[in-house]
Image (cartoon, rainbow, N blue to C red):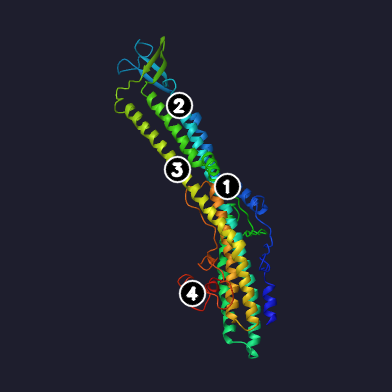
């Protein structure tokens, strides 16, 4: 009996032994910080080699090239012609009214139109730059989510290995006890069943690990088979609750969508100014020479002006159109700002709840589930508890440790979404293979006689079988 107890007490790498008066502080592992070299390397490679970001940067440069185009004068036109008296023969040089004609015409917009067109194009380039900023922020957030998702999956795999080690040894012990008639066959079958369930979960987690590595490699422009070794652990990340007003101020100053909407208002105002100026006529100057062979050549200089005789159907309608567009841009900016503020406040509230959950895990659930496991082991040693209770409380303890990882990942997902200024919901970071209702619920406190969740609240597990055991 003492072999099982010693074995179990040796499999406590995270929380240590629980004390009745003063629980010990969990042993710290290497934590992930902003200076995590693996994460920094992934971010650097993604910013350098991601094709989507390269595309958005190229589009910014393309928009910049439109600025000098919009400010340039219209192209001049060159016309060549001939005028001849009669149809019988060429009369140039013989008749005064017969000549060749070479004419150059240069259109000239009303003063101020070219400058306004340049400003509109410059604001368009600014909007394109903000679109590239959005691509960059989303890329960084995607890399971080995939990276911390990888750490989460690998953390769950480590928990799985802890549990698998105990079950392997427990199966050997129950096998030996059964062979000498001291143990029940049910204990041996249950140990074998749980090991198979762990193998099933391990396969799921390993497939998720491969998918996350492939996603990171795609984001950083590497081949899908490139391995990504990690040494950090997600478990001991710490978070700071930032005041919501500070978050809103930062988001309003740096959100690409909001800044783009504000630039859109300015662009609409300049477009309205241009539409009003378009009611002014444009000009054209022309000059030409008319050689007449042996006769003295003639020359011509001309000036023309456009007549906005259809301004009621064209220019005035264009002004009305731009006025409506300006109102639309103003409404869009207000809508984006309201949505941004809403998302910031939502995630701030989510972070408050998640940090409270983390505190409960670290200060209560982990210590209690560990103590429950130890107490059940002691009762099993003295013959007052069945082996199934030992497995149940072990799975409950492992489930609480997995729940802590999930809560940390959720807090990190909220933090990343805040940094991304995401206008949508908060993309989650989760290990789907362990994402059942049992994860995080843990084992019941106490040993034999302790209450377990009913099937309707514990994922519908059959009576006498722990829901935590099913999830593992």
Q: Which mark is residue 338?
A: 3
**Disc 4 residue crowd, few under 14, some 14–19, many 20+, Cα 10 Å:** some
Going from N to C along the chain, the mark reached first, 4 or 1, is: 1
Kindly identify the residue that appears in the image at 58 percent across and 59 percent down: 358
Task: Answer left or right for 150 relative to 114.
Answer: right
Kindly identify the residue that appears in the image at 65 percent across and 87 percent down: 177
- Give how far apart the Cα atoms at labels 4 and 2 are: 70 Å
Of all residues shown, which one is farthest toward the top? 296
Q: Which mark is residue 242?
A: 1
Q: Which mark is residue 461?
A: 4
Going from N to C along the chain, the mark reached first, 1 or 2, is: 2
| Quadrant of the rendering where the N terminus is positioned | bottom right
Of all residues shown, which one is farthest toward the front? 21
Q: Which residue is mark 2?
A: 116
Residue 374, compared with residue 123, is above or below; it is: below
Residue 18 percent location from the top left of the image: 66, 68
Circles 4 and 3: CB distance less than 8 Å? Answer: no
**Disc 2 residue crowd, few under 14, some 14–19, many 20+, Cα 10 Å:** many
Foreground mark, 1 or 2, reads: 1
């Amino acid at each position: 009996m003492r072999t099982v107890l010693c074995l179990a007490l040796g499999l406590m790498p995270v929380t240590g032994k629980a004390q009745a008066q003063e629980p010990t502080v969990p042993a710290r592992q290497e934590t992930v910080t902003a200076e995590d070299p693996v994460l920094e390397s992934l971010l650097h490679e993604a910013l350098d080699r991601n094709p989507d970001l390269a595309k958005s940067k190229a589009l910014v440069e393309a928009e910049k090239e439109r600025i000098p185009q919009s400010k340039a004068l219209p192209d001049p036109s060159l016309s060549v012609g001939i005028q001849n008296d009669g149809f019988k023969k060429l009369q140039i040089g013989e008749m005064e009214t017969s000549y060749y004609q070479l004419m150059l015409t240069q259109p000239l917009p009303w003063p101020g139109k070219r400058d306004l067109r340049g400003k509109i194009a410059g604001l368009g380039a600014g909007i394109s730059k903000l679109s590239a900023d959005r691509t960059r922020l989303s890329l960084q957030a995607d890399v971080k989510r995939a990276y911390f998702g990888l750490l989460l999956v690998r953390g769950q795999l480590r928990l799985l290995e802890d549990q698998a080690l105990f079950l392997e040894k427990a199966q050997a012990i129950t096998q030996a006890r059964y062979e000498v008639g001291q143990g029940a066959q049910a204990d041996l079958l249950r140990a074998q069943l749980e090991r198979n369930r762990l193998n099933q979960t391990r396969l799921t987690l390993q497939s998720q690990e491969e998918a996350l590595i492939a996603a990171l490699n795609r984001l950083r422009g590497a081949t899908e088979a490139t391995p990504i070794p990690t040494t950090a652990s997600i478990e001991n990340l710490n978070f700071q609750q930032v005041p919501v007003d500070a978050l809103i101020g930062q988001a309003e100053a740096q959100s690409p969508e909001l800044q783009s909407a504000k630039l859109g208002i300015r662009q609409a105002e300049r477009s309205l100014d241009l539409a009003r100026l378009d009611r002014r006529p444009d000009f054209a100057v022309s000059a030409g020479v008319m050689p007449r062979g042996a006769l003295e050549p003639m020359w011509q200089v001309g000036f023309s002006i456009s007549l906005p005789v259809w301004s009621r159907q064209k220019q005035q309608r264009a002004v009305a159109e731009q006025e409506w567009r300006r109102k639309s841009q103003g409404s869009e900016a207000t809508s984006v700002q309201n949505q941004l503020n809403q998302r910031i406040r939502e995630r701030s509230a989510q972070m408050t709840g998640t940090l409270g959950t983390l505190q409960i895990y670290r200060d209560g659930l982990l210590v209690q589930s560990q103590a429950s496991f130890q107490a059940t082991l002691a009762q099993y040693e003295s013959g007052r508890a069945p082996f199934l209770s030992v497995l149940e409380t072990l799975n409950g303890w492992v489930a609480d440790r997995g729940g802590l990882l999930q809560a940390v990942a959720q807090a990190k997902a909220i933090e990343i979404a805040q940094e991304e200024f995401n206008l949508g919901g908060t993309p989650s970071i989760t290990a789907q293979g362990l994402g059942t209702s049992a994860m995080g619920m843990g084992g019941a406190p106490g040993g034999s006689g302790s209450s377990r969740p009913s099937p309707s609240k514990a994922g519908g597990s059959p009576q006498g079988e722990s829901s935590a055991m099913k999830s593992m």
